[in-house]
Structure formats: C-alpha cells, structure tokens
Image (tube, helix red, strand yellow):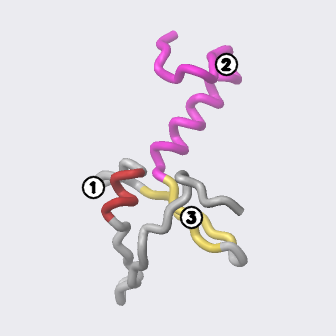
Amino acid sequence: MRASSERKFYGAVTVSERGQIAIPAEARRDFKIDVGDKMLVFGDLKKGIGLVKASVLTEMMTRMMGMFHGGTETDGDEKE
C-alpha cells in the first residue's frame, strides 16, 4: 500500500482524568479547527473513534436538503 499525502500521523495524545485530549496543533491547522468549534464524535467498536466538525455535517445536510427542494449540489452559497 502506497503512502498518501492525504493521510498523516499527527502524534500521540494522553487522556486526562476528565477524559479530555488535546488535538495536535498541526491537525487543527490542517482541518481548520478553531477555538469554540463543535466536534462530533463517532465510534466503531472494532475500528476506533473519528471526529468531524459539526459545521461540516451541517453544510452537507444543507446541500442535501437543497437537492430535495430543487437546489444544486455544487454551490451551497447560492441564494434562492
């Protein structure tokens, strides 16, 4: 399997007593995660945990709803 520039290892983190972790700075920069951003936590008991910015899911759902109501999927910025 070839290494991909889209896949990175950002380092190791330690879980605090309160169950918190810090997302490494490079990962926050690459994924444009800012202070105050809401993150969704998904899990697969065999494969692990994944994080997604809530705004990404909201944008995706908005575009999908636009498709159902006659909008386009290519430009979510269009005003009706």
Percent coordinates x, y for residue 46 in the rendering: 72, 77
Percent coordinates x, y for residue 15 in the rendering: 40, 84
Left or right side of 37 for 52? right
In reply to whether residue 71 is colored magenta, the answer given is: yes
Magenta region: 53-80
Q: Which residue is mark 3?
A: 50
Left or right side of 44 for 77? left
Q: Which amino acid is tagged 3?
A: Gly
> Decide: marks 2, 3 in contact (CB < 8 A)?
no
Q: Which amino acid is tagged 2?
A: His
Mark nearest the camera among 2 and 3 is: 3
Count of all numbered marks drawn on residues in the image: 3
Q: Which residue is mark 1?
A: 35
Left or right side of 32 for 60? right
Q: Which amino acid is tagged 1?
A: Val
Relative vertical location of residue 15 with respect to residue 53 in this rendering, above or below: below
Mark nearest the camera among 1 and 2 is: 1
